[in-house]
Image (tube, helix red, strand yellow):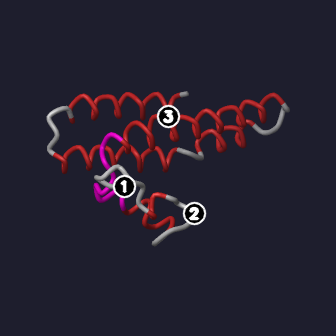
Amino acid sequence: MSSAGQFHPSDNPLGGQGGLSAFFSRRWNGEVPLGQLFWWDMVVVGSIINVATTVVALLILAAKMSALLAVAVHLIPLPYNLFLYGSVLRTADMAGIPNAGPIKISATLWIILASLL
């Protein structure tokens, strides 16, 4: 989303200018507002992805399939979670926002919970 409150074409990871690489690049380089990065990308989308992979991992276990496969499926979102966490910390540092401390602590709690659950 641009500073004017409008979506930027590269916010769509499936298309637009640059597509997926622009999606990741904009977040890593602090071009996405901290509020959007933390609340939407990390808390909403990241949590949905984590819950979905956890449910699939539990279904794998319930079907008496390989526990190793269940663990692998459960850990699939870990690289994306770490990317989001690093992006939030970088953006908070670059933005120089007074409330960046609580956001960084909240992001740290989120990554711990997302990794454990």
Q: Which residue is denoted by mark 3 in the rendering?
A: 115
- The residue lying at 61 percent from left, 32 percent from top is 51
Would you identify the image quadrant in which residue 48 lies? top right
> Is residue 12 found left or right of 4 in the rendered image?
right
Q: Which residue is denoted by mark 1 in the rendering?
A: 27
Count of all numbered marks drawn on residues in the image? 3
Tell me the crowding category of disc 3: few under 14, some 14 to 19, or many 20 or more residues within 10 angstroms, Cα based.
some
Is label 3 or label 2 in front? Answer: 2
Tell me the crowding category of disc 2: few under 14, some 14 to 19, or many 20 or more residues within 10 angstroms, Cα based.
few
Would you identify the image quadrant in which residue 112 lies? top left
Q: Mark 3 belongs to which amino acid?
A: Ser
Q: Position of residue 2 (x, y in %)?
A: 33, 55
Q: Which residue is denoted by mark 2 in the rendering?
A: 14
Alpha carbon separation for disc pair 2 and 1: 15 Å
> Is residue 102 found left or right of 24 in the rendered image?
left
Would you identify the image quadrant in which residue 102 lies? top left
Q: Which residues are magenta?
A: 26-35
Residue 29 falls inside the magenta stretch: yes
Is label 1 or label 3 in front? Answer: 1
> Is residue 111 found left or right of 72 in the rendered image?
left
Alpha carbon separation for disc pair 3 and 2: 26 Å
Mark positioned earlier in the residue sequence (3 or 2): 2
Asked if the residues shown at circle 2 and circle 1 are in contact, with their CB atoms under 8 angstroms apart, the answer is no
- The residue lying at 53 percent from left, 35 percent from top is 47
- The residue lying at 50 percent from left, 68 percent from top is 16
- Looking at the rendered image, the quarter that the C terminus falls into is top right
Tell me the crowding category of disc 1: few under 14, some 14 to 19, or many 20 or more residues within 10 angstroms, Cα based.
many
Q: Mark 2 belongs to which amino acid?
A: Leu
Is label 2 or label 1 in front? Answer: 2
- The residue lying at 37 percent from left, 28 percent from top is 109
Q: Position of residue 3 (x, y in %)?
A: 28, 52
